[in-house]
Image (cartoon, rainbow, N blue to C red):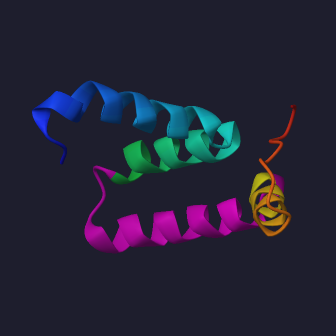
Amino acid sequence: MVPRDRLAEATLELARQVAAASPYTLGLGKKAFYDQVALDIERAYELTEKIMVENARAPDALEGMKAFLERREPRWGGE
């Protein structure tokens, strides 16, 4: 929540954060969200557990951790 007079600024900041994220991770998360919506809670957890493992093993996850430790901006796959 943000005050009404800060809504545009907060929206732009959120958009910047999303744009700076790994395209692979964003796509994986978006697909997982839509795939689990119609599932019961147990099956949704099973699905998202697999997705979380896949994400953690992805090259972009390793790049993100390395960039954080090196105090630099990440260079996502293809950049």
| Residue placed most toward the observer, 60 or 38 | 60
Horizontal side of residue 59 vs 11, given as left or right: right
Q: Which corner quadrant holds the C terminus? A: top right
* The magenta stretch spans residue 78: no
| Residue placed most toward the observer, 67 or 33 | 67
| Residue placed most toward the observer, 57 or 18 | 18
Horizontal side of residue 20 vs 74, given as left or right: left
* The magenta stretch spans residue 44: yes
Residue 63 position within the rendered picture, expressed as x and y whole percent measured from the top left:
83, 56
Highlighted magenta segment, given as a residue range: 37-59
| The quarter of the displayed image where residue 62 is located | bottom right
Horizontal side of residue 42 vs 30, given as left or right: left
Residue 30 position within the rendered picture, expressed as x and y whole percent measured from the top left:
48, 42
Q: Relative to 55, is 74 above or below? A: above
Residue drawn at 28 percent across, 69 percent down? 41
Return the residue found at the far left.
Answer: 4
Residue drawn at 48 percent across, 64 percent down? 48
| The quarter of the displayed image where residue 68 is located | bottom right
Q: What secondary structure characterizes most of the magenta part?
A: helix
Residue drawn at 16 percent across, 29 percent down? 5
Q: Relative to 51, is 15 above or below? A: above
Return the residue found at the far front.
Answer: 5
Q: Relative to 36, is 26 above or below? A: above
Residue drawn at 50 percent across, 42 percent down? 31
Residue 25 position within the rendered picture, expressed as x and y whole percent measured from the top left:
63, 47
Horizontal side of residue 64 vs 27, given as left or right: right
| Residue placed most toward the observer, 64 or 44 | 64
Residue 20 position within the rendered picture, expressed as x and y whole percent measured from the top left:
63, 37
| The quarter of the displayed image where residue 2 is located | top left
- Number of numbered labels in the structure image: 0
